[in-house]
Amino acid sequence: MHILPSVTGKTVLLLYNASRLTHLDLQVPPDQPEDEERCRSIERGAKLVTVMPSTYSLTLQMPRGNLETIYPRALVLASIRRNIEMKKYRKAFLACRSQRVDMNILHDHAPAVFLGNVGLFVDQVKRVDYIDLFLSQLRLVMGCWSDAHDQAD
């Protein structure tokens, strides 16, 4: 999945899935766009400088000239999903841990694939305290990431 960032005149940063972009996606949601995963309020006059997918970050230049780095939720979740699909469980786990994303995404994104690769997950994560953290964070809510995944994709 390729994320296309855009800054609007309404001081909103929008992140689009470039592989499925339509003209309807280019509209800013009318009511409280900040409540949507792919939108984020930013300061008026901010300019997009760069996107760093490897660190899930985006750098903006503010009107006063200072640079600010943010970690948009849509970019973080897209990167975590991509790592899960490539079976890079350690990288996905560490991203969940550092960005405070619910660990259930590691299982719920592709439950059958995850259950078939539990040994690979344990081998990659290695640290007992990380595995304990993962297990303590799991909940029995199946598919809690399906709606967010469908919106971001």
Image: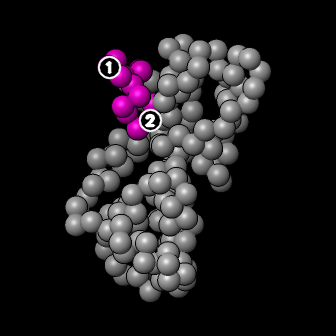
Q: Which residues fall within the magenta stretch?
A: 27-39
Q: Is residue 68 magenta?
A: no
In the image, what residue occupies the spot 53% across and 18% down? Answer: 11
Q: Is residue 112 above or below residue 47?
A: below
Measured as percent of width and height from the top left, residue 21 is found at: 45, 34
In the image, what residue occupies the spot 60% across and 48% down? Answer: 56
Assign the magenta stretch its main secondary structure: loop
- Number of numbered discs present? 2
Residue density around tag 2, few if under 14, some if 14–19, many if 20 or more, within 10 Å: many
Measured as percent of width and height from the top left, residue 50 is found at: 70, 36
Amino acid of disc 2: Arg
Measured as percent of width and height from the top left, residue 35 is found at: 36, 31
- Residue that badge 1 annotates: 31
Amino acid of disc 1: Asp
Distance in Å between CA atoms under marks 2 and 1: 14 Å
Callout 2: SS = loop
In the depicted view, which residue is nearer to us: 139 or 8? Answer: 139
In the image, what residue occupies the spot 39% across and 25% down? Answer: 33
Measured as percent of width and height from the top left, residue 63 is found at: 70, 16
Q: Residue 103 falls in which quadrant of the image? A: bottom left
Is residue 77 rendered to the left or right of residue 144? right
- Residue that badge 2 annotates: 38
Q: Is residue 55 above or below residue 118?
A: above
Residue density around tag 1, few if under 14, some if 14–19, many if 20 or more, within 10 Å: few
In the depicted view, which residue is nearer to us: 150 or 70? Answer: 70
